[in-house]
Amino acid sequence: MQHHGQLPKYEEIEAILAPLKSVLSPAQIHGLLCGVICQGMDSLDEEASVAIAIGVSGQEVEMTEEQSQSLRVLLEYSYEQLSEMAFDFQLLLPEDEESLSFRSQELARWCDGFLLGLEASGAAHVEALNERLSADGYEILLRLTEISEMDETEVPESEENEESFMEVFEYVRMAILMLYSELHPAPHRRGSSSRVLH
């Protein structure tokens, strides 16, 4: 299946957010958008979604066309990959050249953003999703919560730790697709052309 969007680089989103005084990191923003999508938004309003993402909802934010376009690409990528259940779905995280500590921290923040997205889009508490999820699905939410609370300020660089990080990364990546699948039964995923990205 051909995908028209491409995941922007972490540094690109970071550079855009700096002058906007975002309270969230790029990883948290991507997680938040994915949480909003998983919770049930079948049509995304770009302006509202970006306002939520940069953490300044309700405030006037002036963005250049280039800034707006880059955030739009991130939004469209997230929506397309999840709604089409694309198994090459990726998380917006720092490049592999960055320290393992930083990447681990941002993976935790990604999960934190995802849980924020679920809450921001209608679930007052993650527990409120229990009735919509299978036992396995709810267990995934609890596991994502645990990952989001990891506060390891220093992760020694080692092959073993790198492998552990990749295992958690792959778990989160597939877990998000599984949650989307549970929250959006198959009939609602068909005919994706009927959903509109503004």
Image (cartoon, rainbow, N blue to C red):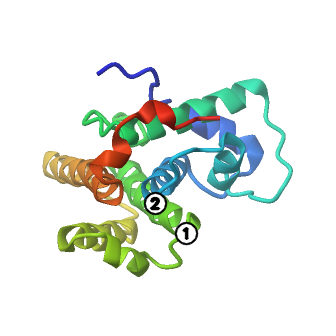
Measured Cα–Cα span from mark 2 to mark 1: 7 Å
Name the one closer to the observer, 110 or 71.
71
Determine contact: label 2, label 1, CB under 8 Å: yes
Q: Residue furthest left?
A: 160
Q: Amino acid at mark 2?
A: Gln
Residue tagged 2: 39
Image: 134 above or below 85: below
> How many discs appear?
2
Mark sitting earlier along the chain (2/1): 2
Q: Is residue 110 visible?
A: yes
Q: Position of residue 75 (x, y in %)?
A: 55, 38
In the rendered view of the protein, which quadrant contains the C terminus? Answer: top right
Which residue type carries mark 1?
Gly
Q: For numbered disc 1, what is the local secondary structure? A: loop
Snapshot quadrant of residue 14: top right
Task: Tell me where residue 25 appears, x and y as whole percent.
Answer: 56, 51
**In this rendering, position of residue 166 left or right of residue 59:** left
Residue 165: percent from left, percent from top? 24, 51
Seen in the image, is 167 located left or right of residue 97? left
Can residue 99 be seen? Answer: no
Who's the residue at 48% across and 64% down the image? 118
Near mark 1 (Cα within 10 A), the count class, few <14, some 14-19 or many ≥20, is some
Instruction: State the mark number for residue 122.
Output: 1
Taking 71 as reference, is 178 above or below it?
below
